[in-house]
Structures are given as structure tokens and as C-alpha cells.
Image (spheres, grey):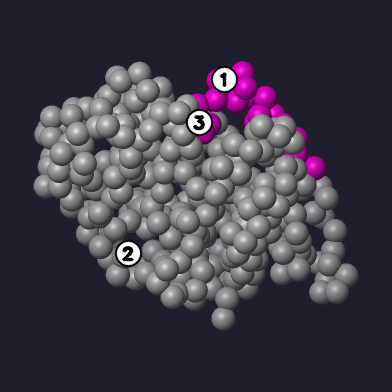
Amino acid sequence: MIQSLFRRLGPRLAAFVMLAALSLTSLVALSGCASNSDSGPLHHLTVGLTYIPNIQFAPFYVAEALGYYKSAGLDVTLRHHGFTEGEFDAISTGRENAIFAGGDEILQARSKGITLKYVAEVYTQYPVALIVPANSPIQSAADLRGHSIGIPGAYGTSYIALLALLQSAGLSKSDVNIQTIGFTQPAALLGHKVDAVIDYVNDGVTLFQKANFPVRTIPLQQPLVSNGIAALDSELSAHASDIKALVKATLEGVQYTIAHPQKAVQLSEQFVPGLNDPAKAADALAVLQATIPLWQRSDGKPLGYTDPSLWQQMNSFLQAQGQLAKPMNVTQVYSNAYLPS
């Protein structure tokens, strides 16, 4: 779900960023081979974070930088995916032990036979919304009829969000003008090529603010489970204690990042190329501060908890929209049993 920032980078800059990230990952992997003298050898886990390093993965970077993973008995490699590989290719073939992905993506993958289970919620809110100019006549999803909406394509997080918006307003795809614009939402809206875009409410809105272009967001009404940690059933059966340790340490990283965003940006410098540049660090802090509300809970449940009723609602929605390869027993797709006790 963090593809948008990668797509906005130019090809040469993206290649440079990935080369630097791969070099850094190799160094981290080599340095992680040590043993924990207090509790014996560390258990190695590779965690897939998808695409390029980004401040939105700060809780993982913080957990690694502050030694939370090591204290939990883990040697963790944070692996950002290659440009062309499928999101679940590496975990399906055993190159990753866990992955950070959206609940909707996990459910879709499970319907295709990839036996993933979602074990800890990190984003408590779906981070995508409809974005319109501040002076737009579009005040709600119901006002979209006849208007043009820019999305990257008929796939992924933005497309699911569009389907949710239309359903909430009793509209169909034929009631609106859907434009495939790639990952160019800011340029498309700034250039008045479309009336609205679907984009992330943290980095997307921040880009409009930086361009001094006032916008409004119209949130989704359809419940969707956002990003969290997942692993294959086979991994959970073989190494349940390691996954529990991973969840605990990562949630500690979430808590620290929420409490200390400025420090979290500094700790992320070793993982995100360019953050030693004050201007880029300031941009990263703005994105992080916009992301923190998406991690916080207001329902009194502990960090990491995922709501069974939300999964049921999402399952029904995705099934009705033809987004699942087969009907699912959704209780097989998530678990709260791996949260800290």
C-alpha cells in the first residue's frame, strides 16, 4: 500500500534509492549475525516491507535501531521488495517469514490459495480517501455522479477504496468517469485533469500542502482492514514464538514512534537514504505526523488487535464486488492469538 511514493520518483532516482537500500540491507544482514549473549543465538526472520524504504515504515526501523528485535531474541532483516516482483512472491517461496500488507490484500491472497494469516494490526484506519480541491462542489461520495476520478488503475488499494466509496453512495462505476492516471495523483488534480483522486491521506495530502493547493478529504464509509503483519500458516505452526516476538517488538516500535516522531525520523536515517538532508527529513516528519493518527486506537483495544466484525464486513464487501477468487471462511484469515499477553 506504500507504492505511491515509489511511482512518483523518477526512474534514475528510484534506481539510485534502491541501490543504496540494497547495500544498506546487506550491511544490516551481516551485522545481525551475532548472538545475544544473554539468551543464546538470535532467531532470524526476514520481514517484507514492499518497495522502497519510506518513513511510513518507521516502527520497523525504530524497532531494529533501538534493539527491540534483538531484545526479543530475533535477528530481523527488513526486506524491501524488488521493482517487478509480486507482493507475495517472496513469502510464498520462503524468502520471507512475515510481511506487512493490507488486510484486504491478505484476504484476496488467501482466496487464491496463499495461506497467509493476519496477526497484528498496525494501521487502525484505512489510509486512503477521496481527495478534492477545497472549493470543489463534491462534498460527499454521493456528489461523485458524473465527475472524473483519477486512480492508478483497476487494481490495488486505490481501486478497492473507489469501489467502497461508490457502494456507500449507491453508485456504480458507470455513474462516474474513472481515469487511469498511474501514480500521478498530485499532478492530475493540480492540473485539473480530473475532478478528484484517490490517494493516501498522509503522504498524498502532505504533497498538496507543500504545493500550497488546498484540498479536502472524503473518507471511506465501507469498513476495510488496513495494514498489519501477516505470516503463512506453515510459519505460524513452525515458529509461533518467533512471530509473537516479532509482533511484540514491532508494536513497541509503533509506541515509540507515536511518542517520539522527531527521534523516529532520526533513527530512520540509516534505513531511508537521504534523510540526513534537513529538507527531506522535514518532509518525512510531516508525513510521519500525518501517519501517526492512523496508528492510534480510540476503541480501548490494545495495539495490534484486529476486529473480527470488521473482517466479516470486509469479506462480504469484497465478495460482493467480485474481488475474491472464491468464497472465504474469514475466521481462517486473521488471529489475535499472537499479540502480547
Q: Nearer the viewer, residue 243 or 159?
A: 159
For badge 2, the amino acid type reads: Trp
75 displayed left or right of 253:
right
Tell me how far mark 1 sits from mark 2, CA to CA: 37 Å
Range covered by the magenta-colored residues? 3-27
Residue 205 at x, y percent in the picture? 43, 38
Q: Nearer the viewer, residue 128 or 27?
A: 128
Q: For residue 26, what is the image quadrant?
A: top right
Which labelled disc corresponds to residue 210? 3
Instruction: Give the mark toward the camera: 3 or 1.
Output: 3
Tell me the SS state at disc 1. Answer: helix
Tell me how far mark 2 sits from mark 3, CA to CA: 36 Å
**Which residue corresponds to the image point at 62% horizontal and 73% vertical from the top-left?**
241
Mark 2 and mark 3 residues within 8 Å of each other at the beta carbon: no
Q: Which residue is mark 2?
A: 311
| Quadrant of the snapshot with the N terminus | top left
**Which residue corresponds to the image point at 81% horizontal and 47% vertical from the top-left?**
30
Which labelled disc corresponds to residue 11? 1
180 displayed left or right of 173:
right
Q: Is residue 119 magenta?
A: no
**Which residue corresponds to the image point at 40% horizontal and 72% vertical from the top-left?**
299
Instruction: Give the mark toward the camera: 2 or 3.
Output: 3
Q: Main secondary structure of the magenta part?
A: helix
Residue 35 at x, y percent in the picture? 84, 63
Q: Is residue 18 magenta?
A: yes
